[in-house]
Image (tube, rainbow, N blue to C red):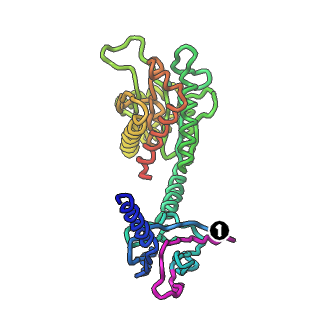
């Protein structure tokens, strides 16, 4: 007896679910709003099959709705939208309602199924997405108006700081090249005071920057702890420098005698060197670069932040544009040294600097 009862229940269940599966789902409403095609049915939509067919430059976007039925039985083809060649809603067979959208463009977003409503995003809607591309292009163009002078510290006979066979001039060149590549990819124009291993005087570097009228100047160096270490000072991590005008007259006089330069040049240079505009912008550049270095680099590494410092370095003094000098780490520090030799670390570090440059320009 029990077995028979179970079979009867089972049969009932089967016929019932079968009935459900065959239930007609009439299309109640078709709405074209802000480049979204919204189709509302009498019941919950169970399944939508979506595929595309490409044919001679036109893409057919097909949406099949199981059990879908047109109330009138007549194919709908009077719908018009931007970027769309045609929209057709018709009966594919007695069990399937088919929507075909013909367009030259791909529908970037997938359709959305919510209860009784199917929303299809039409190409024109995707203009919002493509506007991102336009923005990127515009940004690239704006960045292309900026010239960045990069200075790889030391070079040639001047090896800079060293630890065994690892020398500063090689590290700075490697990092500067990476920074050039990152900046160029972003859209900036870049010039390097040296892109090979050559000896260059400081004045040659600043003359180069001034001759090409760079918008900003960035010099990369590697630090080393002094022989006589000050107690409680941590000789590890990154320092960003910008110009200190302290003792500037004294420094200038020293330089002038050193290079035997004419007084007139020096006066003009002095004006430029202590220009308030340059000071303000160098400070801003330093702040932004430091902030972005750590924001970016600390996603991957724990790095010591030595902060922003002011110095009267010649390259900061004699450049006519906003300028900074980044001491990228200590060659004398075990962890710093290991990282400075690591290509990935170098890349992350210069990415941070480049982001700082973007932030400085507001681009
Ligand atoms: Zn150096």
Residue visible at 48% across and 27% down in the picture: 255
Which residue is located at x 40 percent, y 72 percent?
A: 117
Residue range highlighted in magenta: 55-80
| Disc 1 residue: CB within 8 Å of ligand 1 | no
User: Where does the image place residue 304, in percent across and percent down from the top left?
Assistant: 37, 27
Q: Report if residue 275 is visible in the image.
A: no
Residue 286 appears at what percent x and percent y?
39, 38
Which residue is disc 1 drawn over?
54
Between residue 237 and residue 145, name the one nearer to us.
237
- Is residue 70 shown in magenta? yes
**Residue 112, above or below 208:** below
Q: Is residue 111 above or below residue 211?
A: below
Q: x and y percent of residue 70 in the render?
A: 48, 83
Q: Nearest the camera: 150 or 243?
A: 150
Tell me: 362 left or right of 103: left
Q: Quadrant of residue 322?
A: top left
Secondary structure state at the residue bearing disc 1: strand
Density class for disc 1 (Cα within 10 Å; few <14, some 14-19, many ≥20) is: few
All told, the count of numbered labels is 1
Check the picture and name the quadrant holding the N terminus: bottom left
Q: Is residue 13 magenta?
A: no
The front one of 193 and 136 is 136
Residue furthest to the left in view is 232
Task: Return the residue found at the far right.
Answer: 56
Q: Residue at x 42, y 17 (%)?
A: 225
x and y percentages locating residue 160 in the rendered image: 53, 21
- Can residue 330 be spotted in the picture? yes
Asked which quadrant contains residue 112, the reply is bottom left
Viewer-proximal residue among 223 and 322: 223
């Amino acid at each position: 007896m029990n077995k028979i009862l179970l079979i009867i229940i089972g049969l009932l269940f089967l016929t019932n679910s079968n009935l459900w599966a065959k239930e007609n789902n009439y299309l109640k409403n078709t709405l074209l709003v802000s480049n979204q095609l919204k189709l509302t049915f009498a019941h919950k939509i169970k399944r939508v099959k979506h595929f595309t067919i490409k044919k001679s430059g036109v893409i057919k976007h097909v949406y099949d709705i199981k059990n879908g039925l047109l109330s009138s039985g007549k194919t709908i083809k009077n719908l018009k939208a931007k970027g769309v060649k045609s929209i057709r809603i018709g009966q594919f067979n007695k069990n399937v309602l088919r929507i075909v959208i013909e367009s030259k463009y791909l529908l970037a977003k997938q359709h959305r199924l919510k209860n009784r409503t199917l929303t299809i995003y039409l190409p024109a809607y995707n203009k919002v997405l493509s506007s991102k591309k336009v923005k990127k292009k515009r940004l690239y163009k704006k960045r292309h108006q900026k010239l960045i002078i990069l200075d790889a510290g030391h070079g040639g006979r001047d090896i800079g700081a060293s630890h065994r066979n690892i020398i500063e001039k090689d590290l700075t060149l490697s990092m500067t090249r990476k920074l050039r590549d990152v900046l160029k990819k972003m859209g900036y124009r870049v010039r390097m005071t040296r892109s090979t291993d050559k000896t260059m005087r400081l004045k040659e570097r600043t003359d180069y920057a001034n001759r090409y009228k760079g918008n900003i100047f960035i010099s990369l160096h590697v630090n080393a702890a002094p022989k006589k270490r000050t107690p409680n000072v941590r000789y590890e991590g990154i320092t960003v420098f910008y110009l200190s005008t302290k003792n500037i007259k004294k420094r200038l006089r020293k330089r002038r005698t050193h290079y035997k330069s004419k007084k007139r040049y020096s006066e003009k240079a002095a004006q430029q060197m202590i220009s308030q505009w340059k000071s303000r912008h160098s400070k801003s550049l330093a702040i932004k670069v430091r902030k972005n270095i750590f924001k970016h680099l600390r996603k991957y590494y724990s790095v010591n932040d030595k902060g922003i410092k002011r110095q009267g370095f010649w390259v900061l003094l004699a450049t006519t544009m906003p300028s900074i000098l980044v001491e990228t780490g200590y060659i004398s520090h075990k962890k710093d040294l290991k990282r400075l030799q690591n290509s990935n670390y170098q890349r992350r570090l210069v990415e941070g600097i480049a982001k700082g440059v973007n932030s400085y320009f507001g681009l």
